[in-house]
Amino acid sequence: MTDDGTIDKEKHMKQLKRKMECWREIILPLNSVLLWERSWHPGLIVGFITVIFCTIWILEPTMLTMISMCLLTFALVDYLVPILTSVLCNTQSWTGQKEKKLIEICQNLSAAILQMQSTWNSISKMRHDRPNIYYSTTILCLILFAWIGNTINNLLLLYITVTVILLAPGLKHKGRARSAVRYAYDHLIRRHLS
């Protein structure tokens, strides 16, 4: 990697760290849960998601109501968390070890954001360089998604998607993602090829 790329990564990480400064007391425990540092964290994640989606399923809100409630929740959390952390958390309790952990989290998050941006740029480049491949792939994927969305309940699809997204960091951190892919490849794909 070039020095400019490393400098850009470092700059992006520092900007992200500055933005997350008032959230640092929340980010460390949240990261602990997402990386499954305790054996019960996956159950907590799945249970929390299940309670939220069961509530949505029981209440059956309209789409506009659901979007409004989600945005209201995000706005309240964004407003209240910095205030509550400044009141409840002592600034002397922030140690060098916690600061290192926050920097590590910011580096990982920054790398993920930059990877998504790189993927988006590659897709945009493909759109201009190879429009036939881009449009045929896009059309096939959208037809597949439309068929899946028409076949399976949308709330169930959203539940599965959110669960997979929130469990993915722990699977990756524990190395279970690789073993799950290897297991699926060995037992599903190799059997059909043999």
Image: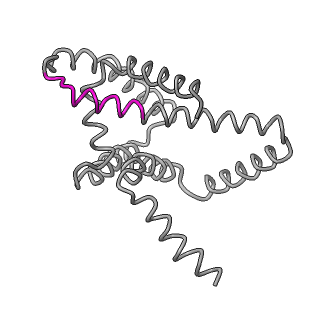
Who is closer to the viewer here, 46 or 192?
192
Q: Where is residue 82 in the image (x, y as percent from the top left)?
A: 28, 17
User: Which residue is outermost to the front?
Assistant: 3
Using the image, determine if residue 65 lies above or below residue 133. above
Residue depicted at 31% across the width and 38% down the height: 31
Residue depicted at 16% across the width and 16% down the height: 91
Q: Is the magenta stretch mostly helix, strand or loop?
A: helix
**Tag count in the figure?**
0
User: Which residue is outermost to the bottom?
Assistant: 194
Instruction: Say which quadrant the C terminus sits in.
Output: bottom right
- In the picture, measured across the screen, residue 131 lies left or right of residue 91, that is right
Determine if the magenta segment contains residue 95.
Answer: yes
Using the image, determine if residue 151 lies above or below residue 81. below
Residue depicted at 52% across the width and 77% down the height: 187
The figure's colour scheme reads one colour
Who is closer to the viewer here, 175 or 46?
175
Corner quadrant of residue 177: bottom left
Residue depicted at 33% across the width and 52% down the height: 46
Q: Position of residue 23 (x, y in %)?
A: 30, 23
User: Which residue is outermost to the right?
Assistant: 132
Using the image, determine if residue 17 lies above or below residue 66. above
- In the picture, measured across the screen, residue 69 lies left or right of residue 148, that is left
Who is closer to the viewer here, 56 or 178?
178
Q: Where is residue 28 in the image (x, y as percent from the top left)?
A: 27, 33
Who is closer to the viewer here, 185 or 73?
185
Range drawn in magenta: 93-107
Q: Where is residue 108 in the image (x, y as percent from the top left)?
A: 42, 36
Determine if the magenta segment contains residue 40.
Answer: no
Instruction: Say which quadrant the N terminus sits in.
Output: top right
